[in-house]
Amino acid sequence: MTTAEKDGGQREPRRSVARCPICNQPRSEEYRPFCSKRCADVDLGRWLNGSYAIPVTEDDDEDGEEDLPASEKKPDDGVS
């Protein structure tokens, strides 16, 4: 008889041990989500030197005027 059959088909989900994203060791509550100060510093260093980056799409329209309807655009008076 399996464990699932013994408890009426209900199984408790397995609890996985949270792991450090840098070295995959079990994490420490003191340095959460890392296992040590070293791994926390490695992660910080990666952010500071640009190893991690959030992808961005560049818009050609930087002033935001192209998306406005004609009725909302400011008239160009030719003065700069």
Image (cartoon, grey):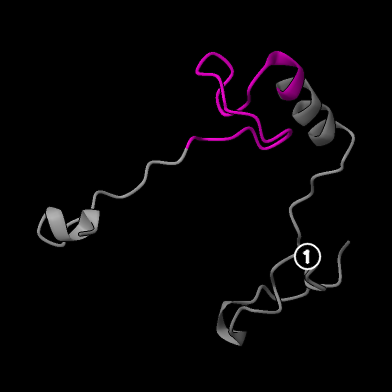
Q: Residue 67 in the image: x percent, y percent?
A: 65, 79
- In this rendering, is residue 65 above or below 51? below
Q: Is residue 33 magenta?
A: yes
Identify which residue is drawn at 55% across, 19% down.
28
Amino acid bearing label 1: Glu
Residue range corresponding to the magenta coloring: 17-39
Q: Residue at x 24, y 49 (%)?
A: 12
Residue shown at 71%/79% (left/top)? 66
**Quadrant housing residue 34:** top right
Rendered position, 38 above or below 10: above
User: Neighbour class for label 1 at 10 Å: few (<14), some, many (≥20)?
Assistant: few
Q: Is residue 54 left or right of residue 72?
A: right
Q: Residue at x 88, y 61 (%)?
A: 80
- Tell me, yes or no, whether the highlighted magenta stretch contains residue 45: no
Front residue (pair 36, 24): 24
Question: Where does the N terminus fall, quadrant-wise?
Answer: bottom left
Could you say where residue 11 lies in the image, as x and y percent from the top left?
A: 22, 54
- Residue indicated by mark 1: 62
Instruction: Determine the main secondary structure of the stretch shown in magenta.
Output: loop
> In the rendering, at what x and y percent does residue 32 appear?
55, 24
The tally of labels here is 1
Nearer the observer, 10 or 47? 10
| Left or right, 15 with reference to 58 | left
| Residue 74 vertical placement versus 27 (above, below) | below
**Residue 10, x across and y down, in percent:** 16, 57
Q: Outermost residue, front direction? A: 1
12 in relation to 30, above or below: below
